[in-house]
Amino acid sequence: MPLTFLIRRNFFDPSRSFFYFQSSQTLANPLSDTLTQIGLILATALAGASGVLALKQSRRSDAGESPVPSSPAKPLPAPALLRGLVVGTLVICLAVVAVRWTAARSGSTGGWQPIEVHADGLILMAAMITWCAMWVVRRGRGITLAAFLLFLVAGLNAWAACPANWRPFTTLAPVWHAIHLVGVSLGTAAAAIAAAGGAMYLVAAKRLKQKLRVASPGSQRLSLETLEQIIVKGATTGFVLLTLGLIAGAVMLSREPGAMGGPFYTSIKFWLAVIAWAAYGLLMNARLTPQLRGRYAAWVAIAGFFLLLIVYGIFTVVPSSPAAGGAG
Amino acid sequence: MRLLLVGTNHRCADVRIREKLAITPQNVERAYGLFKERFPGAELVILSTCNRSELYVAKPSVHAPPSAEDLRQLLAQISGLSIAEVTTATIHREQEQAAVHLFRTAAGLDSRVLGEPQILGQMRRAYELAVSMQTVGSTTHNLFQQALATAKQLRTRTGIGTSRHSVGTVAIDFARQVFSGFEDKIILVLGAGEMIQTVMPHLRELGPRKLWIVNRTIANAEKLAKRFEIGELYTLTDGSSKSIPGGVRGVQDLDQLLLDADFIVSCTAAQEPVIGYDQLKRAAKKRRYRPVCMADLGIPRDIEPTCDSIRNAYLYNIDDLQAVIADNHEADQSIAGQCETEIQAAAQAVLSRVLHRDLGQLIRKLRTDLQTLGELEQDRTTQRLAGVDPQDTQAIEAVLAEHNHRLINKILHVPLRQLNQHDGQAPLGFYAAALRRLFNLSEAEAQSTAPHQPATLDTSEVTVADLEPPKCTQKP
């Protein structure tokens, strides 16, 4: 099926309008759907606004308009508005998760599935990344990283609102399916943080090589060492969670051999996920691997995240194709 | 209240004169003592640092002592210089100009290094000393408190004074962008000359895991290590002990040291590079390409420029660092320009508040005095009226008329006596203009009601600007 046709059908089909959710026996709660949609829109808006604010503050800090004369050990906190917006985003994301969780429990007629649709995984990712962004903002250092993460959160929430992510899963192993999705979702979130750190590392390393204006002592820029730590820690967390997700996926396959529409080794999604998993396995040992120090680690982190996004993308666009590996 | 400043600073006197005019901790009490003895009604704060010695004085009125000349004589007496030398080497400011100078000094805009932060602490200590000497009154209190608060606010908001102005500190700032901390890092210093000596205190402050000094002449390196207590235990001011492990190594150990060094600062007298590309590349491989930051402060360069192309190696030479300093200086100048407007406004505001407060006190005093006068006359008139027949309206009117006449005479007695005294500093026209303004007397009415008399008074028109006494000029 041509890709453009698939994209149109899934994202722009009038019968699948933005405010329409495909109903099923597991989604019998219109109120929760409405609340979820409103929450996603609000979270997208708040995350976008706070990302813009964080970027503005980062630029002001770099331009010296409001350099904060503090010692490197004591950066001043971000403005109250930014902190408020980020906290608001987190609260809404968590509220949406809670609404979805409750709706799933109350609406399920068969076995309860904690994660019923793909959007649940995206919302979970958004919540985790927002929590990390809030930690960065409260710490007062690395506002640019927070801006990256908040834009990502806005993107995830907007993506989660797309109708294509609301097709309910059909599976005989709901618990393993839930573990698989939680592992993969949170693993992707951790990969996103590592990728954000990697992007910032590349920018910072380039600036240093170009001998651009050095930051004042109170600047909110993160050092290269800190960014490398973010990459390694993000990759480590992502690796562990992805391992959990892949193991759960393997268990599901053992119970539903035909779930991927064919042998698992024919699924592109499977191979992309394994490559990303292996990349993060390497990355978490970057400090021990000379070839992976510095910029190379940053590029691997970014590439791994994009691989995982492609995996998600394949599922969203062509969920029924063997390439996507079936329903999840 | 009148604000007065007399003093010297790095702009108007060289160090030879400034050190003589400096009011040191040894003679500051004497200075305050002399001032209190001679000018008991005035307030004083002495600000004396390595770059300035300034006397900030508040006195009750423009004519009250001390004058600028009195303060110069005081400085001459303390310093042992002649009046002529003191006059040449000092500046004199009054009122708004003095207030603006104080605010600019507190903000570091009048310092040698723009925005230097030490002056704030020095000014605070000078103020506290003046308080203990009991020469601070409400005017100097308001001024200094506001100057310190404004300066602090400006520094926080604009960051003036936080820019780095030395190559050593800029090099460390670059290193901070590579490393998050230095507690687990090893610093390698190549050379033991003057530039390295200026950088060493900053390197020590980083608290590295080890600090090695490498120099061709071991004795010089050992002297440097001893001076900065590298490699031995030393006692801090709070009684605790600290040591920075490390010490002195010879040039032959350089290859070994490059394997471990994370931050390298170099400034030697070598004509050829001390660290070559191949040497550093081998070391980088062996250390698994751990990041290394290098600051080459030497001319000719001690580290081959191609070393910058090695993965995870960041090299800055003296030109790179000085370009940053030049940028910082430009940025500081721009910030200083923005600060000037705010400082002018803040100084004007506080001076205006002080003047209004003084005026309020003056008006209250006037009202109290007039009230007393009125009560005295009222008592007298009441007694007179007691002896008058209540039906005799003519007698009552006479008593009341006498009351009015006496009251007006008593009110005008002191001012008219002042007008009759010859005051060289305030010509008659000054008082005439003040009277017209204060009592809203138009000239036409004054001329129509006054009896014809030969002109004995100077009735020349005086403008508002002329109400201020002439300012003394001084050499910059």
Image (cartoon, coloured by chain):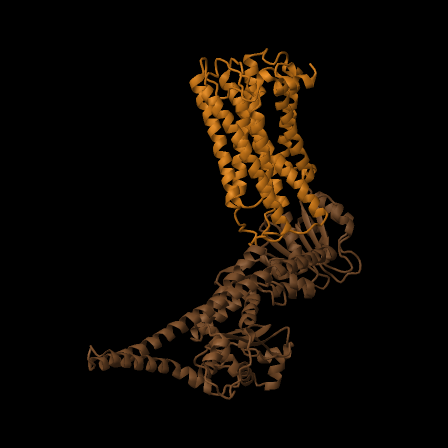
Chain colours: A orange, B brown
Whether residue B249 can be seen here: no
In the rendered image, the vertical position of residue B195 relative to residue B374, given as above or below: above
In the rendered image, the vertical position of residue A147 relative to residue B157, given as above or below: above
**Camera-side residue: B405 or B412?**
B405
In the rendered image, the vertical position of residue B82 relative to residue B278, given as above or below: below
**Camera-side residue: B68 or B199?**
B68
The image quadrant where one finds the C terminus of chain B is bottom right
In-image side of A265 versus A171 (left or right)? right
Whether residue A49 can be seen here: yes
In the rendered image, the vertical position of residue A61 relative to residue B229, given as above or below: above
Rendering coords of residue A89 (x, y %): 51, 35
**Camera-side residue: A160 or A295?**
A160
Report which quarter residue B384 is drawn in. Answer: bottom left
In-image side of B314 versus B379 (left or right)? right
Residue at 46% over, 82% down: B450
Rendering coords of residue B147 (x, y %): 51, 65
Report which quarter residue B141 is drawn in. Answer: bottom left
Residue at 61% over, 59% down: B338
Count up the numbered dots. 0
In-image side of B252 versus B100 (left or right)? right
Taking the view exactly as shown, the residue that stands out farthest to the right is B272
Rendering coords of residue B452 (x, y %): 48, 86
Residue at 51% over, 25% down: A37
Rendering coords of residue A203 (x, y %): 67, 42
